[in-house]
Each structure stands twice: as C-alpha cells, then as structure tokens.
Amino acid sequence: MTLLLDEISVSVDGTALLRDLALTVGPRQIVGLIGPNGSGKTTALRCVYRALRPTGGVVRIDGRDLDRIPLRESARMIAALTQEGGSDLDFTVEEVVALGRTPHLRGNQALSAAERELCRRAMAQTEVSHLAGRGVLSLSGGERQRVLVARALVQEPQVLILDEPTNHLDLHHQLRLLSMLKGSGLTVLVTLHDLNLAASACDRLAVLSQGGLVTCGPPAEVLTEALLRDVFGVAASIVPHPLTGVPQVLYDLGSTPAAKGNPA
C-alpha cells in the first residue's frame, strides 16, 4: 500500500506548521522523518492518522483521498503509535492489546479464537506476555510502550505510523522493535530522534526544518556533515558502520554551541 503526502500544508492561528510537504512511502518501505524540534514531523503524522486535517493538500492511500475514506475503513488500514498514546484508565495489558481489534468488530462483538491468538502472538512478539493481567497504569514507560506496539500490530494495518516509538525503550527493545519493523512488510512512516537508529532502520530519510522538506533520500545520501551543521546546528563526523556500511553519526560535545559559551 502506498502512502502519499501530496503538498500537505498545515496552519494554526496564522502560523505555518507544514508547508507544501510532498512525500511518498511505497509498499513495504520504511521512511523516517527527522529534523529539529518543531520542524513539523508530528504534525505530518497527525495528518495521516486523521487527528488533524491539512489546510492544504491531500493525504492519499493507494491514490484515494484519505478524507473520502470512511473512518472505520481507514482505521483498518492505518495504525498509529503516538506520543500521547497512554490511557488514564487502568485496563489490563491484554484488554489494551485487544482494543486493536476494535475497527474490525461490530457493537459488542466478542473476539474470535483466531483474534485472541493474534493478541497472544503480538504480546509475545513485544515481550509483554508476562504482563497480560497487569493494569497498564502500573507499568513502566517502556513496558507501556511495548503494549501499545502490540495493540497496533493486532490492528493488522497495512500502514503503520509511529511517532518516536523508541521513547522509553531500553537498548534491547529499541533494536528489537526496529528489526521487527524491517521484517514486517508494512508501509511505515516513523519519526526518530536517534539518527543512527534512523539510518539503520529506514530505507529513506526525509529531513524537515521549519515546516518544509529539506531533502529526502537514502541515509547514505541524506546524512552529511553539512546537513547536520545547517539543519541541526551540530558539528559531527559521518563514518560507515564497520559491518553494514550504514552511515553513523559521531558527535563532538566540545564543539557544540553550548559547550563554547560561558557556563551559567
């Protein structure tokens, strides 16, 4: 399934948050959105999972205008893991994961045996099976994040939208999640702050700054020392990973603007 952001613009109270963003995510492709805070990454994702309507442009799914697709149908196609994905209600883990089936059910329809097995597999995949009976409010941030990933998998989407999915995760679970995404066969649009993880996990990187697209392409073409200096305001060196050849960013804390200034 192909996801197209067709010249998307978003303005709020006269302030442009996104400006004519054009981006394509092809079938089974992982595209990472990277950029400084406030560059428009989350705003772009919110347009795709229909939490926000663009003020200009169109989001298309396999050529169809997303706004013309019934909400239940689009919820079966698109799953989202957002930064505000928590719950104030103390559902159990297995109850939260089962909520991923909601777009596929009618009324109070109970889960089928196959759907219950799907939930069990998703919890095993995200290593939360042992937490099934626990209330989500009792979990750590990382545990809760893995539960929400399981909920998204249970939804059986064709397009997966992830806003900083590695937040709160320890290194083991960060790598496990990104490896799972690479093998999922889904169309994935993801924001990541860790540029080294983004370079390893994504087929292409799209760089946003001040609501506009700076560049988009394979990590080896996008991640340059000049781009890091101009977009992120940091001095860094780019080296190939010794095993994969994927570009890796090496930072010099002594060359950052904060380090050069006088201490408070």
Image (cartoon, grey):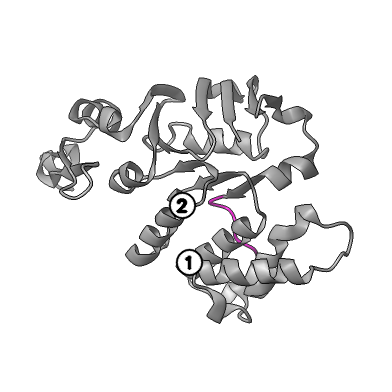
Position of residue 261 measured from the top left corner of the image (x, y, whole percent): 13, 39
User: Where does label 1 land, which residue?
Assistant: 141
Measure how far apart labels 1 and 2 are at the Cα level.
25 Å
Circle 1: residue type: Gly
Q: Nearer the viewer, mark 1 or mark 2?
A: 2
Q: Quadrant of the N terminus?
A: top right
Q: Percent position (x, y) of residue 162?
A: 52, 47
In the rendered structure, which segment of residues is drawn in magenta? 82-88
First in residue order: circle 1 vs circle 2: 1
Residue identifier under label 2: 183
Report the predominant secondary structure element of the magenta stretch.
Answer: loop
Instruction: Please identify the quarter of the rendering in which residue 260 is found.
Output: top left
In the rendered structure, which amino acid carries the disc numbered 2? Answer: Gly
Secondary structure of the residue carrying numbered label 1: helix
Image spot of residue 204 (x, y percent) = 39, 33
Q: Between 7 and 203, which is closer to the camera in this rendering?
A: 203
**Secondary structure of the residue carrying numbered label 2:** loop
Q: Give the camera-side residue of 228 and 146.
A: 146
Residue 255 at what x, y percent from top left?
11, 39
Residue at 14% in and 46% down: 253
The reply to whether residue 89 is in sight is no
Q: Is residue 200 above or below residue 93?
A: above
Seen in the image, is 229 located left or right of residue 255?
right
